Image: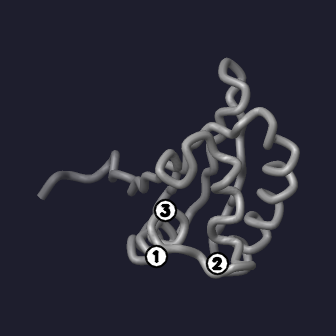
């Protein structure tokens, strides 16, 4: 089974940029600790403050759990899951997450 590619997109409040940059490092460390692969963050060249996280998870279940923790559940104090959400314009509701599975470009559709 191929891993699932996950994209997370949001816009950071300009006055929260430094705090966000500090906290996203903790998120990256924690995500790697729980088994997320290739966690990287990009900022929009044409849209400063627009950030995209990209990473791989082994299963759709892992993706759904992370999405639930980052976007839906109220995180306990001190947990990393939603530590950057208050830096996002519009808060948690404006954090968008999608998962993609690779297609077989060489196979047949049977």
N-terminal label among 1 and 2: 2
Front residue (pair 3, 63): 63
Quickly name the residue at label 3: 71
> Regarding mark 1 in the picture, which secondary structure is present there?
helix
Q: Which residue is label 2 attached to?
A: 35
Residue 110 in which image quadrant: bottom left
Of the two numbered discs 3 and 2 on the same chain, state the one appearing first in sequence: 2
Q: Is residue 21 visible?
A: yes
Please tell me whether mark 3 sits on a helix, a strand or a loop: helix
Q: CA distance from mark 1 to mark 2?
A: 12 Å
Q: Of discs 3 and 2, which sits in the foreground?
A: 3
Where is residue 35 shown, x and y percent of the image? 64, 78
Q: Is residue 109 left or right of residue 102?
A: left
Work out whether residue 37 or residue 8 is closer to the camera in this orientation and state it. Answer: 8
Disc sitting over residue 65 in the figure: 1
Image: 77 above or below 23: below
């Amino acid at each position: 089974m191929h891993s699932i590619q996950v994209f997370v997109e949001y816009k950071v409040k300009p006055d929260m940029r430094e705090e966000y940059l500090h906290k996203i490092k903790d998120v990256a460390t924690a995500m790697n600790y729980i088994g997320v692969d290739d966690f990287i963050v990009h900022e929009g060249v044409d849209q400063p403050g627009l950030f995209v996280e990209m990473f791989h998870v082994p299963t759709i279940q892992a993706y759904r759990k992370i999405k639930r923790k980052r976007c839906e559940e109220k995180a306990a104090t001190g947990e990393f899951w939603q530590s950057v959400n208050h830096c996002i314009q519009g808060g948690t509701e404006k954090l968008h997450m999608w998962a993609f599975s690779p297609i077989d470009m060489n196979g047949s559709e049977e």
